[in-house]
Image (cartoon, rainbow, N blue to C red):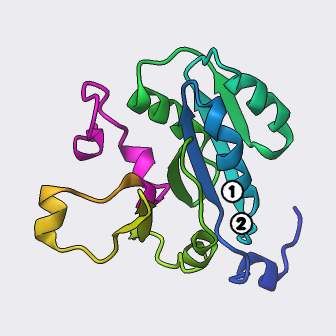
Amino acid sequence: MAAIKANEALNTNTPARITVIIVTYNAAEYLQSCLNSIYAQKYPAIDIVVIDGNSTDGTADILQQNTSKIHFWVSEKDNGIYDAMNKALPHITSQWVYFLGADDELLPEFSEMASELKVENAIYYGNVLADGVKRSGLISSYYMAKGGIYHQAIIYPASVFKHYAYNTKYKIAAEYAAV
């Protein structure tokens, strides 16, 4: 039996790992910029999982070129975005999960937010820039009921996905009907 030093077992200076999940389909035009925005983060503990829907535009070639920096990727037919997101769930390797669109980019502030992940059963959310406008921020219960939060603004505890998956009968807004 190997002995573990007390400070190694309780090292609170080690940043929590985050799995960034990207689902793609014919996203060659955007994917490398998306990946580069993740690589540029100062936060040191990010695993990337990419589920591609069997693209025909060179997306798989980009993934192949980035294999050494991606924790897991596959290019195979799926039944839409939520099916692809569900296919990614078994590949979560961390305490936290973040879903990013292949045509989205992480801003440097993501690293700042990631360093604040302290409460393991909390869902964290921040702002996104959409069409050059800052969106989300602090939202009311009313706004949440009417419109919700951009999924690109949310960091989930991985434990959520041990119990829930996306309901694939919905083509949009399946976040509201987990199974």
Figure quadrant of the C terminus: top left
Q: Which residue is mark 2?
A: 41
Residue drawn at point x = 72 percent, y = 83 percent? 13
Magenta segment, which residues? 152-179
Contact, mark 2 vs mark 1 (Cβ under 8 Å): yes
Residue 164 is left or right of residue 12, and the answer is left
Residue drawn at point x = 58 percent, y = 24 percent? 26
Q: Is 52 situated above or below 136?
A: above
Q: Which residue is mark 1?
A: 38
Looking at the image, which residue sits at the far right? Answer: 2
Position of residue 86 measured from the top left corner of the image (x, y, whole percent): 45, 33
Q: Amino acid at mark 1?
A: Ile
The mark found on residue 78 in the picture is: none
**Nearer the observer, 15 or 139:** 139
Can residue 154 be seen in this snapshot? no
Crowd class of label 2 (few under 14; some 14 to 19; many from 20; radius 10 Å): some
Q: Amino acid at mark 2?
A: Gln
Q: Provide the secondary structure element on which disc 2 rests.
A: loop
Q: Provide the secondary structure element on which disc 1 rests.
A: helix
Marks 2 and 1, how far apart in space?
Answer: 5 Å
Q: Is residue 59 magenta?
A: no
